[in-house]
Every structure is written in C-alpha cells, then in structure tokens.
Image (cartoon, grey):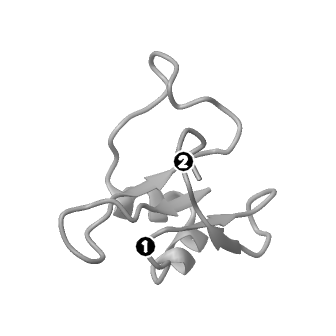
Amino acid sequence: MVVHDSEGEGEGEGDWLIGDGINDPNLPDTSGVYCLACLVEEDASVSGTADLQPGCAAYRDEPGLAWTIEPFRYEDDEG
C-alpha cells in the first residue's frame, strides 16, 4: 500500500506513506522512517506509484501484481 497524503502545508505537499497492508502501523515498534530510494531498491515496482496524486492510495494484493489506485481517507475521518 502506498499513500500520497493530501494533508500538508501546500498543494501536493502531503507525506508519502508505505505499508504492508497487514500490520497495524499504530502498534508499538511497527512503524519507522525509511529512505524511499532504499525501498525502491528492495522493490522497484514501488516507483510505479511516483505519480500518485495527493489524496490517493495504491493497493495490490501481492508484489508483482498491478497497482489499483483509489481515493484515500483515514478511517477516523468523518464524512
């Protein structure tokens, strides 16, 4: 899962979040800050999400499959 967060100081200034889609990133010792280039070295297909628009997420069921792009909202956002 790759998310281009729409929250930020300016247009397109949102953070990028990458997760495995399985583990809860809110649990202790399950999140970290990593070099994006290093993640791409591990899985070059992550670079295929570089044009992801703010407020969108890319999902796939397993490495090697095509990315599915969808709008992204945090679960606790109202609306």
Q: Position of residue 44 (x, y in %)?
A: 55, 71
State the residue position of label 2.
74
Label 2 sits on a secondary structure element that is: loop
Q: Is residue 7 left or right of residue 53?
A: left
When the figure is inspected, residue 35 is found, relative to residue 65, above or below; the finding is: above
Instruction: Categorize mark 1 by other alpha carbons within 10 Å: few (<14), some (14-19), many (20+).
Output: many
Say whether disc 2 or disc 1 marks the residue closer to the N-terminus. 1
The quadrant holding residue 11 is bottom left
Kindly give the residue lying farthest to the left in the view shown.
Answer: 9
The quadrant holding residue 9 is bottom left
Q: Are marks 2 and 1 in contact (CB under 8 Å)?
A: no
Q: Is residue 43 left or right of residue 66?
A: left
Q: Position of residue 78 (x, y in %)?
A: 55, 46
Q: Is residue 59 left or right of residue 46?
A: right
Q: Position of residue 76 (x, y in %)?
A: 55, 38
Label 1 sits on a secondary structure element that is: loop
For image coordinates 45% across by 53% down, the residue present is 17
When the figure is inspected, residue 65 is found, relative to residue 22, above or below; the finding is: below
Instruction: Categorize mark 2 by other alpha carbons within 10 Å: few (<14), some (14-19), many (20+).
Output: few
When the figure is inspected, residue 22 is found, relative to residue 78, above or below; the finding is: above
For image coordinates 65% across by 31% down, the residue present is 23
State the residue position of label 1.
54
For image coordinates 57% across by 62% down, the residue present is 43
Looking at the figure, which quarter contains the N terminus? bottom right
